[in-house]
Image (cartoon, grey):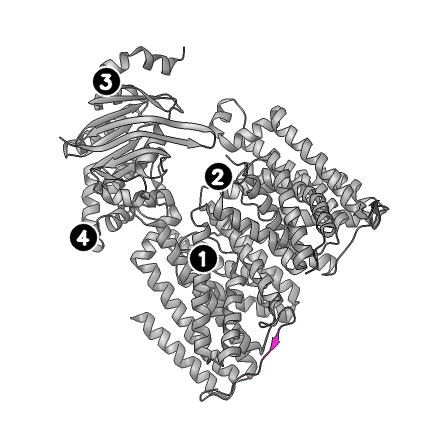
Amino acid sequence: MKFWIVSASAIVAAIALALSGANEYLFFAGFVVLQAVILATGWNILGGYAGYVNFGVPGFVGVGAYTALAMHLLWSAPLLLQIIAGAVLAGLLGIGVGLLTLRLRGIFFSISTIAVVFILEAIVMNSRFLGGATGIQLTRPNEVLFFDSYTRMLFVMMAFMAVIALSIARYVQDSHIGQGLRAVRDSEEAADCSGVPTLKLKLIACAISGALLGVAGAPMPMYLSYVEPLSTFNLHYAVIALAMPIIGGTSHWLGPLIGALILGTLQQIVTVTVSSELNVLVVGVLLVVFVVAAPDGVIGLVKKWKTSSK
Amino acid sequence: MENILEVKDVGKNFGGFTALSGVNLSIRKGERLGLIGPNGSGKTTLINCISGALQNDLGTIHFNGESISRLPAHARTRRGIARSFQIPRPFHSMTVLENLMVPLAYVGGVSGEKAKVQARQLLEDIGLADKAEAASSSLSQVELRKMELARAMAARPQLLISDEAMAGLSGSEVDDVLDILIKLNKQGITIIMIEHIMHAVMRFSERLVCLDAGQIICDGDPQSVVGNPQVQRAYLGD
Amino acid sequence: MFFSFELLFEAVLFGLLLGCFYAAVSLGLSVAFGLLDVPHVAHPALLIVGSYGAYMLGGWGIDPLVSGFLLMPVFFLVGMLLYRFYYETFESRGSAAGVNGLAFFFGIAFIIEVLLVVAFGVDQRSAEADYIGESLRLGDLRLPYRLLVAAGVALVLTVVLTQFFSKTFVGRAIKAVGQDEGALRLMGADPVRIKQLAFGIATSVNALAGAMLIIVSPVEPTMDRIYIGRTFCVVVLAGMGSMSGTLVAGLVLGITESIVLTLFGASWATAVAFGLLLLMLGLRPQGLFGR
């Protein structure tokens, strides 16, 4: 109950912000942070809950983005429909990769996800319809609902999507499925022998995770008014999608949120004070530091601190 | 009395290596079967083929009259085959209680308070009641073995396979586990026990089967199997 | 479409040479991942570091191949330390070594990439030597010397390593440790030490392979990504832990890539390794020669 109250307030706050006279830059940055929350949350459903590491995040983000693009080019589809289509196709991609490699060990799944990125990138590069290597410029449609600008509307839409992503993660975690996924992560063999249909559960996690990653990518064409493969299929997405849940904590739905907020803030600070290359380095270093020293993330540290101070 | 398990002409290969060949085994309901044989004789492979961790390449396996060779492990568990692992595999992020709640939920469809009650009962029976809320990662070896058995029991099996549950345990710990297995058998559960600790096997089994190099070389009452020259040669070499 | 057998023949020949090179580049991974089961996705990143190392030494007029040899001991030490750290942090803790180990190496690979960008910029760097740029002419065919040199060294390296792992005591111990640690312990050997040694060897091979890479083509910091595809493709195609299979697998990849390059162009060629990898994992995960 508390969750829904907080979420509803968050959305109301987002709408209020968008209707206010705040600086336009806030909404550009806000979009990026909210996208990060969705990325981290989506990744964690497969990576944190089930223990299968998806390196191919850029591929799923790209599927979301390019599906949205196609919907826009072919049918001038409204934003919401673009996002849904992106989610569906990315989810299907997740199932596809899963079917191919989930019977094998975890690392083969992970390497396969990298393969997916390169193959998708090659497909896009060779597709004139999707803009090829040079990309496509777009004009944003006029529907801004009751907001002053398209960016503000995008911001509110992303806030909605972030809440949906978090509630899905929360639901999965506390459900029957979450229990099974935890068993799979801890010991897949024992899970099998305990009656857990491991393949089915992993495929479900792949589908949900993939779909959410697609949701993160789908608004990109509209956000940038421009899509091109190099930045869409950027490895950067893979690193942050991994780093945020690991920093925040992978076993709880709050972890990715915490990680996204910490990393997002840190990145802004570093970019502004030092440089943008170093910003990227910070992500990698934090990832390694946390994996080595605090593998349960901030949530794990808080738990430890709580139990030791008792 | 029908057979709960029918293993006919089962064979299993790994690349060029034949782990099992021509294995025939019929197990009666409620039987206490000891499975022995030197290292590498194929005991664990056979167990894996029965439990579904592996699929047999040749032959058939029937459980309660139904062919199970094509079924994945979790489907076999749901039909009543449970096993413990040689090296315990706890769900390490969960407490002991939560460990048991997984099979209770996924095999028995029981969750929430009802499952907790049943889980506590199982832990009582096995002597781990005081560890219910403990993290499974904090258990000692013998406690882990007991939890393995408890978790297998939580799947309410008709056939329980215990894979070297007593390896590395002290004398009294071995007796502990043995008593648990005998008690379970008295409740009507068919048990296959793989073990190297001879006195435990002899005390427990009604019938002994000896494997060597992937084939059954002897099958019968414990005394005669142990006295069989082929069996002795398998263990001691020529 | 005009289809020339000559073009195809040249592509196959080119692919054979390239394939030898791919095999050599994958040997280190075959040991680290194929034999030792370490989820070493940072292996290609270390390869690129080797290339840049050769590039730097090239600034002092040292031939890239010589640089490769010079760097081998350094890389050996780095490999040993890296494995030790990995082992102490992940494997011995017995924690979710799966996710965390993978994430660790991925993070390392990324950090290496970024550091290389900071140090050398994003532009491509090449090596200089007399034989680069020249080709051997056989009738109408032109075989670039740089490829011949790389292929030659690669072949020698493959043979040496294959022999090492099957004939020497240390080599066989390494093979054994991948399969049965317990037995090794009984023999009095320390499995961790052996794995450390193996990892050191695998990494030092990278020094030489990296030097070959910069001979064959210019390098830039993000090249490790495509090489993740190529090296894992070769290792999976060969079958985990099969040293001899690595050469055949490398050739298969090299020829396939070369033909695709000729027929469909460069942007598809980069996807070949990944496509082959997926195909293999889907159809025959144990590889061509795997156990």
In the rendered structure, are the residues bearing label 2 and label 4 in contact, judged by CB atoms less than 8 Å apart?
no
Q: Nearer the viewer, residue C207 or C87?
A: C207
Query: In this rendering, do the residues under marks 2 and 4 share a single chain?
Result: no
Q: What element carries label 1?
A: helix
C126 w.r.t. C182: above or below: below
A160 w.r.t. A283: above or below: below
In the rendered structure, are the residues bearing label 4 and label 1 in contact, judged by CB atoms less than 8 Å apart?
no
- Determine the residue positioned at 57% across, 48% down: C41
Q: Is residue B148 visible?
A: yes
Give me the disc on residue B222.
3
Q: In front: mark 2 or mark 1?
A: 1
Disc 4 residue crowd, few under 14, some 14–19, many 20+, Cα 10 Å: few
Query: What's the distance in space between the residues labelled 3 and 4, CA to CA?
Result: 42 Å
Q: Nearer the viewer, residue C283 or C36?
A: C283
What's the amino acid at mark 1?
Answer: Gly
- Determine the residue positioned at 23% across, 26% down: B33
Q: Please give left or right for residue A122 compared with residue C215 in the image.
A: left
User: Residue C92, position in %: x, y?
Assistant: 48, 39
What's the amino acid at mark 3?
Answer: Pro
Give me the disc on residue B114.
4
- Disc 2 target residue: C92
Q: What stretch is highlighted in magenta?
A: A134-140
State which chain disc 1 sits on: A
State which chain disc 4 sits on: B
Q: In front: mark 3 or mark 2?
A: 3
In the rendered structure, are the residues bearing label 3 and label 4 in contact, judged by CB atoms less than 8 Å apart?
no
